[in-house]
Amino acid sequence: MVEANVSRQIRVTLYSPEEDRIERVLPGLRDAHRFTLNTLPPFLRFYTRIKDHEIFDYKKEAKSLRATVRHRLVQDLPNATEQMRHDLDLIFGIVADVADELAEAKANLDEAGLNLALNSSDKFQFSYEETQREFETKMSEFRTHFRGADEFGKHLYDRRCALDRRLEVYKREIERRMPTQRD
């Protein structure tokens, strides 16, 4: 009995504030990383479908992406800090905003292309080319923000792995310093 209490006291003494902080932060990092892994693929599919000129309701799909982000922010982050939720909301909110703008640009491009096909005048040719440039700009903007969200996800993963390793080192150190219990 006394030996168990001494072991417990040694463990508590060795249990550093840093280890305690890591154990508080780590579940939120895991949740945030999982959030990015689950949220990025629908944005990538959206971009790929637009880039490949698939026919689908761009605007509806963009609105769905925004709803997915909002839903996942509430459902998938039970352990994340408010700051982490805010950061993810900001990053993915920007990507969703640009997806909305990209959907609008694609719809405008399709309309301009249809007008050009029906009326091959210089006025419609100029309008189509201008709309094409706007669309390409939005595509580039989307890629940039998507890459930023992806990089943030990688950063979360790296932080999570580093904290997992550090926590493992602390636990091994505690076990090493613990007196062995006699049978």
Image (spheres, rainbow, N blue to C red):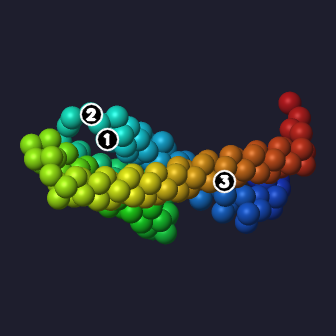
Please state if 122 lies on the left or on the right of 22 as rendered: left
* Residue reaching furthest to the front: 122
* Residue at left offset 44%, top offset 61%: 91
Percent position (x, y) of residue 4?
A: 78, 47
Q: Is residue 131 visible?
A: no
Q: Position of residue 89 (x, y in %)?
A: 40, 62
Q: Earlier in the sequence, mark 3 or mark 2?
A: 2
State the separation of the CA atoms marked 3 and 1: 33 Å
Judge by depth and name the residue closer to the eye, 121 or 132.
121
Q: Residue at position x 29%, y 36% from top? A: 53
Query: Considering only vertical position in the picture, is 55 above or below 161?
Result: above
Label 1 sits on what residue type? Ile
| Image-based side of 127 in relation to 86, left or right | left
Q: Nearer the viewer, residue 48 or 157?
A: 48
| Residues at marks 3 and 1 touching, judged by CB atoms closer than 8 Å | no
Circle 3 is placed at which residue position? 159
Point out the tag, 3 or 1, that comes first from the N-terminus. Answer: 1
**Mark 1 burial class by Cα count in 10 Å: few <14, some 14-19, many 20+:** some
Distance between mark 3 and mark 2 Cα atoms = 38 Å
**Residue farthest to the left, as pictured:** 118
* Tags 2 and 1 touching, CB below 8 Å: yes
Q: Which residue is rendered at x = 29% and y = 59% of the image?
A: 130
Identify which amino acid the numbered label 2 is placed on.
Answer: Glu
**Amino acid at dot 3:** Arg
Which x, y percent locates residue 74?
33, 56
The residue beneath circle 2 is 54
Q: Position of residue 24 (x, y in %)?
A: 59, 59
